[in-house]
Image (cartoon, helix red, strand yellow):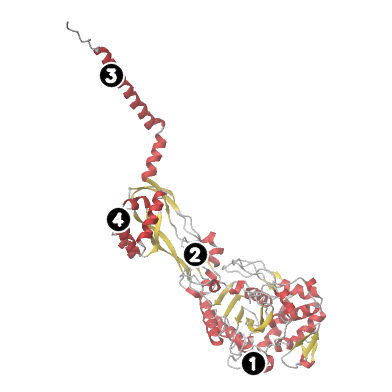
Amino acid sequence: MIRRRPQTNLRLRLSVVLVLLGLGTTALVVRAVDLQLVRKDFYQRQGDARFLREIAIPTSRGQILDRNGEPLAVSTPVESLWANPTVLAEHADRIPELAQALGLNADDLQRRMQEKAAAKREFDYLRRHMNPEQVERVLALDIPGVNTQREFRRYYPAGEVMSHVLGYTNIDDQGQEGLELAFDGWLAGKPGSQRVIRDRRGRVVENVELVRAPEPGKDLVLSIDRRIQYLAYRELTATLLEHNASSGSMVILDAPTGEILAMVNQPSYNNNARGNAEPAQRRNRAVTDLFEPGSVIKAFTAAAGIESGRFRPDSVLDTNGGSLHVANHTVRDIRNFGPVDLTRMLTKSSNVAAARIAMELDNRELWSVFHRIGVGEVTGSGFPGEASGVLPDAQRWGLLHKVTMSYGYAISMTALQLAQAYGALANHGMLVPPTFVKGTRRTPREVFDPGLARTIVAMLETVTGPEGSGTRARVANYSVAGKTGTSRRATAGGYESRYVSVFAGMIPASSPRLVGIVVINDPQGGVYYGGLVAAPVFGRVMDGAMRLLDVAPDRVLAAVDRLPPPEDSAESLPDLPAELLQFAEGVQP
């Protein structure tokens, strides 16, 4: 008996196939709708993320110019090499070749690329701020994932002559010190942005659109005169070498405006070579380092005495014996000057005469004068890290403290503060806060009666006369008013035989245009008086500055730079009690 095979239901099979095809078609249609309509933006972003990039357009930092338009800081375009670690890791056999071209360790570079590729990083700098020839040699190797990027590097034409004023920028062109830091927001530009298409190797193959145009930084015009700055730097450097001194500073102000025409320090550093200088070399000592001013403060002691009404310029002070006992301490002069008036006190720099004035004054009267000229407060110049100095409250003063302050101990200040103070005398009693920016209008304030200021200037002119301690500050055919100062340097536990030589002056004395401060630390060789070390720097720099600024001579005088001052006009250096240190906290050892 033969069995029949069951008949195949072709209709059913066909129906099943049609249903499956219908479902598949429906799925494809749904998927297409999802891709093209529902989630179009999402997938577009995903595609763009792989090929469309938004990259920054670098922009240059603003120039820094001196008052005459000479460039002091400029930004130059440079190239930086970068790699896409994901791509480069896929061609690991080319990494040794790349490392050799860049002078890097191949194993370290390979390890770094693998780590960043594992973290899905797509950008890593290989070397920044390269010259174009180096970049072209590397790109010629055609290593996948290696690309270049335009950046800017800061360049300082004056180098170490201007380094303390300007400071420097880091590798990202951001201000780190000096005026580069103080005016970073003004100088820094705003990078632009554009969309580009990159290939899988990271190379730009097409610019799509400009998102934001770059905005260059704004230029900054300083009050600094590059010519006077060079002159001051040269003379300060020569003096430190001559006297084997450890450091020094010089500040020059335009008396009527408070504009800083020069500010130099030694030791210095080259701000074109970032990171190669020690912190001590990078410090702008003229605004950060404190010192006890010594006899240069006697001008303001005299002003306090005259302002009190108890003294006149011709009031006679008894300095007989050349010493004075005050609170179990002896104040001494270099010799017995006998009776002296206030003018001769400055001419001969008598400590005893200054002490006698202080003893007649109330604490607040002397404190008020020191406070008004800015001791204990920053000048407002805006320079980063500016020190305020130390002026103890008058209620803390004992008699000995007041006496020693009258000739420049137990208080401390910076070279810039001292320049501001002498600027007030030069500017007929009006104190103008110093500024580094040309044309800045600072609001002056009256700190002395104009007549009193002119009287003190006339008295200070005798210091550079034939009998004064500052003859070496004289400038041919110009009158010079100023004061020498010499002080012992404070160290932990007391004072030692290390000295600070100072000269503070103005020129021409008949109508002061410039104020100059010279501070020399630790002169060696037995010559350390301010009249012998600091005053000659003032004289030589101002001699050149008067010609550069075309200031007319105000009288016919011979310069006596080569003649020593009278032997009896050097500053007496008192033995100071250790307890005075608590009043001069912050003095740099």
User: Which of the image's four quarters has the C terminus?
Assistant: bottom right
Q: Nearer the viewer, mark 4 or mark 2?
A: 4
> Which numbered disc, 3 or 1, marks the residue that appears first in the sequence?
3
Q: How far apart are marks 2 and 1 (CA)?
A: 46 Å
Instruction: Answer whether residue 474 is visible to the viewer in this image.
Output: no
Report which quarter residue 353 is drawn in.
bottom right
Secondary structure, mark 4, is helix
Q: Earlier in the sequence, mark 3 or mark 2?
A: 3
Q: How far apart are marks 4 and 2 (CA)?
A: 37 Å
Q: Which amino acid does label 2 sit on?
A: Thr
The disc label shown at residue 93, or none:
4
Quarter of the image where the N terminus is located: top left
Q: Could you tell me which secondary element the residue under label 3 belongs to?
A: helix
Q: Mark 1 points at which residue?
A: 565
Residue 239 against residue 215 in the figure, above or below: below
- Work out whether residue 573 or residue 434 is closer to the camera in this orientation and state it: 573
* Mark 4 crowd level (few <14, some 14–19, many ≥20, 10 Å Cα): few
Badge 3 density bin: few <14, some 14–19, many ≥20, Cα 10 Å? few
Q: Mark 3 points at which residue?
A: 17
Point out the tag, 2 or 1, that comes first from the N-terminus: 2
Judged from this view, the residue extending furthest toward the top is 1
Residue 556 location in percent, x, y? 61, 90
